[in-house]
Amino acid sequence: MHFSSLRPWLAPVAASLLLAGCQGQSATDSQTAATGQPAEAAPTDTASVPTPNDGITPALLARHIKVLASDEFEGRRPFTKGEEKATSYLASEFKKLGLKPGPGGSYFQAVPLVEIAGQPDPTATIAGNGKSLTLSYRTDYMFLTEREKPTVEIKNSPLVFAGYGVTAPEYKWDDYAGLDVKGKTVVVLINDPGNAGTDSTLFKGREMTYYGRWMYKYEEAARHGATGLIIIHDTKPASYPWTVVQSSNGGAKLHPQTPDHGAGKVALEGWMTLDAAKKLFEAAGQKYDDLYAAANKPGFRGKDLGLSLTTTLHNKITYKTSKNVVAVLPGTTRPQEYIIYSAHWDHLGIGPAVAGDSIYNGALDNASGCAGLLAIANGFVQAKEKPQRSIVFLAVTGEEQGLLGSDYYAQHPLYPLKNTVADINMDELLAFGPMRDVTITGYGQSDLDDYARTAAKEQNRYVIPYQHPETGSFYRSDHFSFAKVGVPALYASGAFESRLHGKAFAEKQREEFEAKNYHQPSDQFNPAWDLRGAAQDARFMFRIGQQLAAETTFPQWKAGSEFRAVRLKSRPQ
Ligand SMILES: [Zn+2]
């Protein structure tokens, strides 16, 4: 799972947890009993979880996780020996199952990346309107660029305030209406108009849309020909402090290589503090509060601020190539239609030692998802009825650095996107037993919800929307790269209610992983894990793939989804 200060499932802690004395990832009923708390009637309930003999088992998952998360794989960081080992292992396991390589006869897709280590000037100058203002790097702003050039100069670029920087036809909202931003630097608010919370009827209300993401804002500004875009950081709507903006946007960053070497991106991607923004608006003779209020009303019109920005970015550029792993089970009757299962193979590698351990093994994040790919592949291979559509297994690189491998695939698809029926993504399978729920992140976006409901029902599970949509979690794993290019994508897992121990237990397990193991060396394989929930989730996704493979129809994005328009362009209904 790609980093964010606020983890998607992290809910407020219940004041007193029923199983507060129960420690560890794999509490069994006997352990529960040992805490002196009343144990639930687990055994009969366990019997109600259907476990068909379909080759998708906790033991198989454990076997693969154990290998992929072993110290020998060195935390699977791209460009290391760990990458070689992990990608070779996955390819050879797919081969053993009898799956075919991708187009061109290779199990690998090269992913050319560029590392840009940026060092912006220590200051930036804002001038005009008879005023001059000097802002400081890190204290007031974080600037970077995706242009592959040693020096990127911003010289007297006029500043424009453009509300949220959003052009959203389906919400009849255009912050760029009537503005000419060519060569200018656009200053915008964080998040989207609904998510900001001033008016719950705008956009999707509390649930963040794609328009609230910084990535979208930079891309939209580039589409309008802007030189740069600066987001005003506000801790409350962002849900993380300025220090997170500092740490995520300083130093070296990896990006997919582009044929134009980043020329199609804005030259300057920036953030500034709310304090700095207030000073800037004051120099422009404007009040931040007034502009903020205006920007939250439909029909808002952006304006030139009568100021301009001057600063320089210095970059060290390094080109490197990583790889995605791809394997295919060709469809029997419609092999030219594809269902993709994705999971990222990469993790953080070797880093600062914690309690004497410097290998960030990434067992749940995301050796578990890769094990899920292999288990689902095994399921398809064992099944009597072969899929009519082709099933593609895609283990992608660079997720931890910003969904790089999946993004590269989406921009350079090995199979036509318009014939790609769906992407089903796995990131961090469960290690604390079977669940009653299937929590869908991005619920309501596409028809895949209906397929999920059918598959969940087979397992006596219920479907619920992800409970904290305001955090924008739909945009934080690899399925999003597919959604962006219009392929319906599903990201779902048990999260909310343990079948054996209830809701508070599930929350506590999630929270403990979050606090103690997430992106830590301690995210390592534990033989005591209960991987029945992981197997259940993998089977749930396998069954969805089987449903999709047996049909001739294509699931659609629902009306109102921000991904519908791009799909309709390539695949009109
Ligand atoms: Zn992660």
Image (cartoon, rainbow, N blue to C red):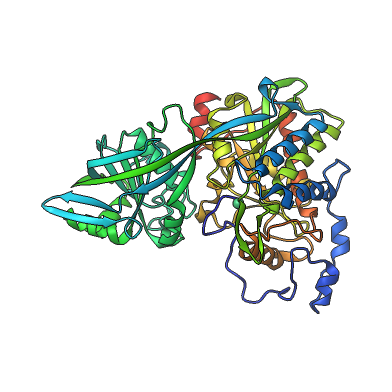
Residue 225 percent across, percent down from the top left: 31, 33
Callout count: 0
Residue at image location 41% in from the left, 58% down from the top: 197
Q: 246 left or right of 463?
A: left
Seen as rendered, the residue at the extreme left is 130
Query: Image quadrant of residue 34?
Result: bottom right
- Taking depth in this image into account, of 486 and 248 the one nearest to the observer is 248
Seen as rendered, the residue at the extreme bottom is 36
Residue at image location 42% in from the left, 41% down from the top: 316
Query: Image quadrant of residue 521?
Result: bottom right
Query: Image quadrant of residue 25?
Result: bottom right
Residue 306 percent across, percent down from the top left: 17, 46
Residue 278 percent across, percent down from the top left: 26, 59
- Taking depth in this image into account, of 389 and 353 the one nearest to the observer is 353
Residue 291 percent across, percent down from the top left: 26, 54
Residue at image location 57% in from the left, 56% down from the top: 8
- Taking depth in this image into account, of 3 and 180 the one nearest to the observer is 3
Q: Quadrant of the C terminus?
A: top right
Residue at image location 23% in from the left, 46% down from the top: 309
Q: 242 left or right of 539?
A: left
Asked whether the viewer can see residue 343, the reply is: no
Above or below for 29 versus 180: below
Asked whether the viewer can see residue 31, the reply is: yes
